[in-house]
Structure formats: structure tokens, C-alpha cells
Amino acid sequence: MPILNPTTGNAYTQDELTDLIVERPRQPNALSARVQVTSQPVNVPALLIDRKGSTIDIVDPKPYGAPPKQVEVDRRKPIPLAVPHYPSQIILRATEVSGQRKAGSDNEFEMPEDLLNEKLDQQIAEFELTTEHILFGAARGQIVDSAGQVEVDLAAAFGIGPTAIPVDFDDPDLDPAAFFRAAKRTLKAKLGGMAVRSWQAVCTGELYEALVTKEAVKRSFDFYMQGAALRGMSNDGPTPFVLADNVEIWEYEGADLPSGLTIGPVNQILLIPNVQGLFQRRNAPKQGMGTVNTPGRPYYANQDDLDNMAGVKIDAEMNTIIYNTRPEGVGDIQQA
């Protein structure tokens, strides 16, 4: 017996079940909530990615009739890439709700729709965690899959990658604020005139402590955190500390997955600019009748009955790629 749409009274169609996932409230993880990702659909499951190498500069004013400035673009170096496919499955069995009391009630039975919502929330959380992992890969100039394997190293393919910035964390005279001001100037020059809203310095707990305990910033850090506690900021994930100008440093509470994969920075600080257009996401269509060669959606889902009407199987998928258009605009800060 399929899951019914309470609005229509009929079984969820593929489009309706997809909408149920796409329109569900998102709970993005930390990095996904702090940097802009431009999302667009594509009609095919493969892309051709290239680097234009455009140099963006201010156009100087000249008298009317004077020759205009020529916009120079380097020759392109395209590489083909298949959009990674991330399938997920939910199985609702009648035995899971048979005789089960609804949470918070002593006279109502749990319905299949209640269990569906619970499992959808878990599925969305897994998709969001996967997206977070993909975004960290993009920050490093890589396209990775959910198992941590590097599908394509764009940095190696195009000969560019995150800018290495060494620092001696053990230097007692290190002024973190001055260091990050200099670091962001170095990276800003590599962003081709893009307007940066903020800089996100994402690091492990060890490096976070090494910086915020420096004498040059310790007092301001303590005052800031006291104010953050009063404002309730510490109750909503990691609390960023404004270390220098618009540079926010925060400890990334990385996720350790059963496969042994750790999501987040590893023995490094990633200095990531929050700038429109830097990170690009492309969603490819589901390879099925009715969706092939159509504009891709962030997620897809459809349902089928189990044998003997024992339950319902819901297959969902995410066909997406996230890449960094200017990998050199991200700083890779490590111990000198």
C-alpha cells in the first residue's frame, strides 16, 4: 500500500514525493550555512568544466571616441566530468507501526506518515552531511564523493590550488589578527575583484586553541565569548570569533563517519572567502522516464510497494557537483 498524499488522498507521485524532500526545512551544517553556493540545474549527467582565466579589472574612464579596453581571456582547458550520483533508500514496513503508540499520545496509533516524516528527516540529514563533505572538497579544489575518494582534482588539472600560507603557531609573539589581515590581502588579490562579504577561518580544535590563547587576542576573545554566551550564540553550533576585520575563526566540529572519513579541516586552517559566484553547484536530472534531459533538481524520490504489500520502498537520490571557480582564493594555512 503506497504512502498517500493527505492533500489529494492519492498515492504520492514522483513529483509530489520529490517536492516533499526538496521543500522540507533544511538544516545545513556549519560551513554550508556560512558560505554562498550558487546553484543551477543542468539537463545532462555529464559536464565539461573549464577555466577561463579571466582577469577582472576596473575600466578606466576615457574620452568619447577613445579605443575601449580589451577584455583578455586565457585559452580554455576543458575537462569532462560525470556528475556524481548519491542514492539513498527508505523502507517503511507495516510491522514497524503495527500496534505502535504515537509519541506524546496514549490513545493514538502511529501512522505510516509519522514514520515517513521521521525517516525523511534522517535522510535529509545524511544528504546535508554529504553536501558539507562535498563543499569542503571544493574548498580544496577537489571534487569528492561521499566515500572521501577524489573524483577529480581540479587543482592538479588546471595547475592551481589553494594558496599555501605557512605560519608558526608556536611563536609566542604571533599576532593572529595581524597574520590574518595579511593573509586575506594575499588571497583577495587572487579573487579577481570579487567582493568578499566575510572570511571564514575554519580549523581543528587544536589550532583554534593555539590561536585564541595568544596574548595578543586572549583578552578580546574572552570578552567576545562572554557576550556570545549572553546572546545565546553558543547554543547554535560553533561560535565564530571575529579575529580580524571581517575574518571569523571557528572550531569545526567535524563528523567522524563509520567509514573512518572525517569531514572538515585536517591539521590545517582553511581561510575561505564568502563571495558570490566562487562556489558553484550543478544539479543533474534523475536518469528515468519523465526526468531524463530535464532541468535537474536538488533531490529526487519515488516509491514502490514491497512484495505482498508488506510496506513501501522510497528511493531518493542527489545528483550534484560543487566546485570552486578560483581555488587559489582559498588559503591553506599550516604549521611552517
Image: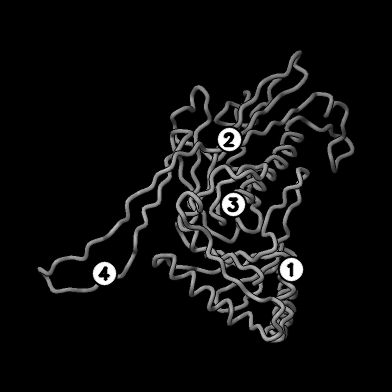
Marked residue nearer the N-terminal end (3 or 2) = 2
Residue sitting at x 58%, y 35%: 85
Marked residue nearer the N-terminal end (1 or 2) = 2
Is label 4 in contact with label 3 (beta carbons under 8 Å)? no
Q: Which mark is residue 234?
A: 1
Numbered disc in front, either 4 or 3: 3
Numbered disc in front, either 1 or 3: 3
What's under tag 4, amino acid-wise? Val
Q: Which residue is label 3 attached to?
A: 137
**Viewer-proximal residue, 218 or 74?**
74
Q: Secondary structure at mark 4?
A: loop
Residue sitting at x 85%, y 43%: 104
**Viewer-proximal residue, 230 or 166?**
166
Q: Which mark is residue 59?
A: 4
Marked residue nearer the N-terminal end (1 or 4) = 4
Is label 3 in contact with label 2 (beta carbons under 8 Å)? no
Marked residue nearer the N-terminal end (2 or 4) = 4
Q: CA distance from mark 2 to mark 4?
A: 43 Å
Using the rendered view, name the quadrant where residue 165 is placed.
bottom right
